[in-house]
């Protein structure tokens, strides 16, 4: 009877561990990025990125994995802003992200976002803010016009939160009106102690 109880306990323990791991994987961001040569970047996206970037010579190429999802990113700097153009393995553009500062967000919208963050935790530090342009049309002129006219879709943020001596990070997606659309955990970095 004792062996049966131990066996039953082990089965439940492993089942719980597998379920918890599966839950964490679907709702967390554990991204790995590696620099690659242009030859390893999807061919279809190269000319499109070259056209819209206007950066021409200082484009850096990356392969990114987030769990089982593989994508590619081209990063460049233009007019004082850092751009990141993401595409899938076939070279179809997914989105463009432009790094910005807090002051580039209207104060009413930023206050709304700050209120949402304070609901998660009273102590938070916004580490990164990006405007996100979701790409539906692969036409270079349409994409360039959206960038020039600042027709972005969302704000994407990486925010560090502190509760009861524990620091954790989340990637949060807000609409351009400041409505929280999505959030997921981000893998912890090693320098947390200097944030708060």
Image (cartoon, rainbow, N blue to C red):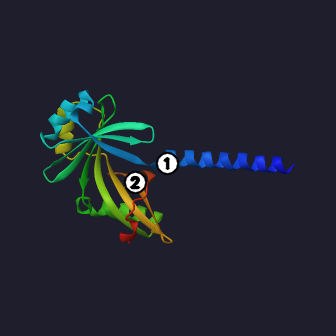
- Answer above or below: position of 90 versus 148: above
**For the residues carrying marks 2 and 1, which lies nearer the camera in this image?**
1
For the C terminus, give its image quadrant.
bottom left
Where residue 27 appears, as percent x and y from the top left, is 49, 48
Q: Can residue 33 be seen in the rendering of this structure?
A: yes
Horizontal relation, residue 28 to residue 102: left or right:
right
Question: Secondary structure beneath disc 1?
Answer: loop
Q: Residue at x 62, y 49 (%)?
A: 17
- Answer above or below: position of 187 versus 11: below
Where residue 144 appears, as percent x and y from the top left, is 18, 38
Where residue 163 appears, as percent x and y from the top left, is 48, 69
The residue under label 2 is: 172
Question: Secondary structure beneath disc 2?
Answer: strand
Which numbered disc, 2 or 1, marks the residue that appears first in the sequence? 1
Is 174 in front, or is 6?
6
Contact flag, marks 2 and 1 (Cβ < 8 Å): no
The residue under label 1 is: 27
Total labels drawn = 2
Q: Can residue 138 be seen in the rendering of this structure?
A: no
Q: Residues within 10 Å of mark 1 (few under 14, many from 20)?
A: few
Between marks 2 and 1, how big is the CA–CA gap?
Answer: 12 Å
Horizontal relation, residue 50 to residue 192: left or right:
left
The image quadrant of residue 15 is top right
Where residue 143 appears, as percent x and y from the top left, is 21, 37
Q: Residues within 10 Å of mark 2 (few under 14, many from 20)?
A: some
**Residue farthest to the right?**
1
Q: Residue at x 44, y 70 (%)?
A: 122
Is 57 in front, or is 120?
57
Residue 150, label in figure: none
């Amino acid at each position: 009877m004792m062996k049966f109880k131990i066996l039953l306990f082990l089965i439940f323990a492993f089942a719980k561990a597998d379920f918890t791991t599966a839950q964490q994987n679907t709702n967390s961001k554990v991204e790995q990025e590696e620099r690659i040569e242009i030859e390893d970047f999807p061919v279809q996206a190269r000319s499109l990125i070259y056209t819209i970037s206007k950066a021409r010579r200082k484009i850096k190429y990356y392969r990114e994995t987030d769990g089982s999802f593989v994508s590619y990113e081209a990063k460049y700097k233009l007019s004082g802003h850092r751009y990141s153009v993401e595409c899938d393995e076939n070279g179809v553009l997914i989105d463009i992200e432009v790094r910005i500062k807090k002051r580039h967000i209207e104060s009413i919208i930023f206050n709304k976002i700050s209120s949402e963050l304070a609901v998660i935790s009273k102590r938070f530090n916004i580490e990164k803010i990006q405007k996100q342009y979701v790409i539906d049309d692969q036409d270079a002129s349409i994409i360039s016009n959206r960038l020039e006219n600042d027709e972005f879709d969302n704000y994407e943020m990486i925010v560090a939160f502190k509760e009861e001596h524990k620091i954790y990070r989340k990637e949060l997606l807000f609409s351009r009106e400041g409505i929280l659309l999505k959030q997921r955990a981000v893998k912890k970095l090693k320098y947390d102690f200097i944030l708060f």
